Structure formats: structure tokens, C-alpha cells
Image: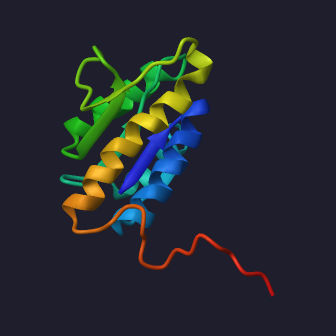
């Protein structure tokens, strides 16, 4: 699965990809919406899973366009965008200021990540190979 974002939303995509691996055992890799057009797009065909984060801001329209293009290609697109956005599947909370939206966006995703993990028979707070204590030697 590819998880896409752009600008401040790229950090959200990276965190979401990490959490999908950690809590649900899903191989997910994050890319910029622009960067994906330089190679990883070759992977995307019919049925390929994509999670696209499109919070408010100047990057949003390009991500919405990309999501629509990938849907037209037959990809399984989950669009995470503010409520009221056409074709949004996962509504993202909005903060008082757009620059704070990435924080609200990842919080919105965590709820979905927990539900996904539990639906896959996993406990999202107890990943199999993750220890809360890191030992250095």
C-alpha cells in the first residue's frame, strides 16, 4: 500500500504508514504526491490500495486530482480529507489554523488505525515485536 501526502501532510503520511505496519501488519510506504509520479506510480494498477491525505492548504488540490486519477486507473483509494470534500472517505478534523491541520489529521487517522487493527485481530497498543523500552549496547 502507498500512503500519500504533500507539504506538511507528508509527515502525516509517513506516520500513518508506520502505524499501519506497526498495528496492523500492513506493508505501507509513504511518498509525496509529487514524488510518487517519478517511479512508484508504476506499481499502481487495478485494485492497488492507496491512502491519500489531502488536508487544507495549497497542496490539497493536487492530491485530490491525484486521488481521482488513481481511482480512474482502478486503484482502491481511501481519501482522507476534511468533511465536505468531494469523494472523501476518511473525514479529517480541522484545527483552528490550517498550519495545525496535520496534527488534527493524524489524530483523525489514529481512530481508523485502531479500528483496522482490531478488525484484523490485533491489539493496537501491543504490537507483536515492539517494545516500549529501547536498549542500547
Given residues 30 and 92, the one toward you in this image is: 92
Q: Residue furthest bottom?
A: 137
| Rendering coords of residue 37 (x, y %) | 47, 43
User: With 84 as the anchor, is 63 left or right in this view?
Assistant: right
User: With 91 as the anchor, is 95 left or right in this view?
Assistant: right
Residue sitting at x 39%, y 35%:
108
Given residues 73 and 67, the one toward you in this image is: 67
| Rendering coords of residue 39 (x, y %) | 49, 54
User: With 74 as the anchor, is 66 left or right in this view?
Assistant: right
Given residues 127 and 3, the one toward you in this image is: 127
Colour scheme of the picture: rainbow
Total labels: the figure holds 0
Report which quarter residue 65 is drawn in.
top left
User: With 107 as the anchor, is 113 left or right in this view?
Assistant: left
The C terminus sits in image quarter = bottom right
Q: Is residue 90 visible?
A: yes
Given residues 79 and 47, the one toward you in this image is: 79
When the figure is inspected, residue 99 is found, relative to residue 110, above or below; the finding is above
| Rendering coords of residue 26 (x, y %) | 35, 65
The N terminus sits in image quarter = bottom left
Report which quarter residue 9 is drawn in.
top right
When the figure is inspected, residue 129 is found, relative to residue 79, above or below; the finding is below
Residue sitting at x 19%, y 59%:
119
Residue sitting at x 31%, y 44%:
112
Q: Is residue 7 visible?
A: no
| Rendering coords of residue 54 (x, y %) | 43, 28
Residue sitting at x 51%, y 18%:
95
Amino acid at each position: 500500500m502507498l500512503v500519500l501526502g504533500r507539504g506538511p501532510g507528508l509527515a502525516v503520511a509517513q506516520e500513518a504508514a508506520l502505524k499501519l505496519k506497526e498495528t496492523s501488519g500492513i506493508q505501507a510506504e509513504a511518498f509525496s504526491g509529487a514524488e510518487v509520479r517519478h517511479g512508484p506510480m508504476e506499481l499502481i494498477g487495478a485494485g492497488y490500495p492507496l491512502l491519500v491525505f489531502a488536508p487544507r492548504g495549497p497542496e490539497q488540490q493536487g492530491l485530490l486530482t491525484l486521488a481521482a486519477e488513481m481511482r480512474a486507473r482502478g486503484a482502491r483509494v481511501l481519501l482522507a480529507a476534511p468533511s465536505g470534500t468531494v469523494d472523501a472517505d476518511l473525514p479529517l478534523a480541522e484545527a483552528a489554523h490550517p498550519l495545525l491541520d496535520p496534527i488534527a489529521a493524524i489524530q483523525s487517522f489514529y481512530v481508523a488505525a485502531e479500528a483496522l487493527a482490531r478488525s484484523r485481530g490485533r491489539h493496537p497498543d501491543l504490537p507483536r515485536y515492539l517494545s516500549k523500552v529501547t536498549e542500547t549496547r
